[in-house]
Image (cartoon, rainbow, N blue to C red):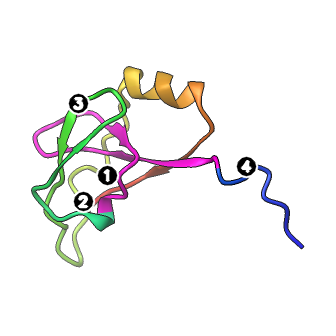
């Protein structure tokens, strides 16, 4: 029997690069569950426009972007979050 050390309280956050941005922001909205062009809120209240999916065989333009929003990082540090970096 597995014991869930986080209970049901652990929140997933996704580090994404919104369209037109050059920094990753964290959001609790699962990026794959929303459509391209939809605006979702980041933890720091920045509005993130979901980019178009990258065609098969190409690397996402956001992949080399590693700079993370310090406000989002601070909010993550305050909570019990499971972090995932997500590229489209």
Q: CA distance from mark 3 to mark 1?
A: 20 Å
Highlighted magenta segment, given as a residue range = 9-31
Q: Which residue is mark 2?
A: 60
Question: Residue 48 versus residue 22: which sits nearer the camera?
Answer: 48
Mark 4 residue crowding within 10 angstroms, few (<14) / some (14–19) / many (20+): few
Q: CA distance from mark 2 to mark 4?
A: 32 Å
On screen, residue 13 versus residue 49, left or right, reads: right
Residue 37 disc label: none
The quarter of the rendered structure image containing the C terminus is: bottom left
Q: Secondary structure at mark 4?
A: loop
Q: Which residue is mark 3?
A: 46
Q: Which numbered disc, 3 or 1, marks the residue closer to the eye?
A: 3
Which circle's residue, 3 or 2, is located before the other in the chain? Answer: 3
Question: Residue 20 versus residue 35: which sits nearer the camera?
Answer: 35
The quarter of the rendered structure image containing the N terminus is: bottom right
x then y, percent, for residue 56: 22, 78
Does the CB distance between marks 2 and 4 fall below 8 Å?
no
On screen, residue 8 versus residue 49, left or right, reads: right
Residue 63 disc label: 1
């Amino acid at each position: 029997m597995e014991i869930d050390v986080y209970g049901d309280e652990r929140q997933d956050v996704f580090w994404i690069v919104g369209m037109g941005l050059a920094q990753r922001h964290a959001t609790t909205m699962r990026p794959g569950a929303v459509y391209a062009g939809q605006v979702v809120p980041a933890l720091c209240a920045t509005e993130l426009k979901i980019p178009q999916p990258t065609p098969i065989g190409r690397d996402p333009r956001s992949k080399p972007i590693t700079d993370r929003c310090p406000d989002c990082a601070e909010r993550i540090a305050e909570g019990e979050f499971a972090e995932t970096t997500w590229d489209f």
